[in-house]
C-alpha cells in the first residue's frame, strides 16, 4: 500500500494524464471542425454495438456540397437510442475524405473529451487536496 505522503502524486499523475488526453482529443476535434464542411444528413439505419455495453450507432446518409451521396456509421452510440430512422441531423465531413464524418451534436462531438476532462479534473483536485491536508 502506498504511503499517504505519495498518494497525492498518484492522483495528480492520473489527473494530469486524463487532462492531457482530453486536451489532445479536443485539439483534433477542433482541427477537424475547422477544416470540415457542414451539411444535413438523414438517419437510415442503426448498427447494434455488442460487447459489455450494447448501444445503437446511427447510420447516416448525406450529400456533400458537390452533390455526391455518402454514408457513415457514427462512432458514438447510445442506449436508449435518441434517434429514429428518418430523423435529420447536422453532419460535419472532411472534404478530402467525405467518408470521414460525424453527427454534429454535442454528444457526438464532445462526449469523449468531456468525460476525460471531468475525470482528470476530479483526480487532480483530489491530488491537490491530499497534498494540502495529508502530505
Image: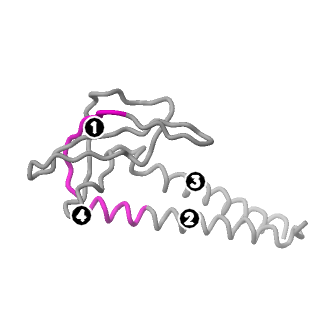
The residue that disc 4 covers is 35
Residue 43 location, quadrant: top left
Q: Say which mark, if any, is on residue 89.
A: 1
Residue 12 location, quadrant: bottom right
Whichever of callouts 2 and 1 sits on the residue coming sooner in the sequence is: 2
Whichever of callouts 3 and 2 sits on the residue coming sooner in the sequence is: 2
| CB-based contact (under 8 Å), mark 4 and mark 3 | no
Indicate left or right for 68 with 50 as reference. left
Q: Secondary structure at mark 1?
A: strand
Q: Which residues are magenta?
A: 26-45
Indicate left or right for 105 with 69 as reference. right
Whichever of callouts 4 and 1 sits on the residue coming sooner in the sequence is: 4
Q: Is 83 drawn above or below residue 20 in the view shown?
A: above
At 42% from the left and 39% from the top, the residue drawn is 57
**In the picture, which quadrant includes the C terminus?**
bottom right
Front residue of 135/100: it is: 100
Q: Secondary structure at mark 2?
A: helix
Q: Nearer the viewer, mark 4 or mark 3?
A: 4
How far apart are labels 3 and 2 at the CA level? 8 Å
Q: Say which mark, if any, is on residue 19.
A: 2
Q: Position of residue 115 (x, y in %)?
A: 54, 52
Q: Is 13 drawn above or below residue 62 in the view shown?
A: below
Q: Secondary structure at mark 4?
A: helix
At 64% from the left and 64% from the top, the residue drawn is 15
Front residue of 65/61: it is: 61
Front residue of 128/75: it is: 75
Q: Position of residue 17 (x, y in %)?
A: 61, 68
Q: Nearer the viewer, mark 2 or mark 4?
A: 4
Q: In the rendered picture of this protein, how many numbered marks are placed on residues?
A: 4
Q: Position of residue 49 (x, y in %)?
A: 50, 40
Whichever of callouts 4 and 3 sits on the residue coming sooner in the sequence is: 4
The residue that disc 3 covers is 118
Amino acid at each position: 500500500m502506498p504511503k499517504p505522503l505519495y498518494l497525492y502524486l498518484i492522483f495528480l499523475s492520473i489527473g494530469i494524464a486524463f487532462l492531457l488526453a482530453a486536451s489532445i482529443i479536443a485539439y483534433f476535434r477542433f482541427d477537424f471542425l475547422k477544416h470540415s464542411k457542414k451539411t444535413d444528413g438523414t438517419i437510415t439505419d442503426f448498427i447494434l454495438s455488442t460487447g459489455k455495453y450494447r448501444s445503437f450507432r446511427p447510420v447516416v446518409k448525406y450529400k456533400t456540397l458537390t452533390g455526391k451521396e455518402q454514408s457513415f456509421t457514427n462512432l458514438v452510440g447510445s442506449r436508449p437510442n435518441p434517434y429514429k430512422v428518418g430523423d435529420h441531423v447536422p453532419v460535419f465531413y472532411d472534404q478530402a475524405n467525405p467518408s470521414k464524418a460525424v453527427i454534429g451534436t454535442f454528444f457526438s462531438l464532445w462526449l469523449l473529451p468531456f468525460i476525460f476532462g471531468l475525470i482528470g479534473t476530479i483526480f487532480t483536485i483530489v491530488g491537490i487536496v491530499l497534498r494540502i491536508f495529508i502530505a
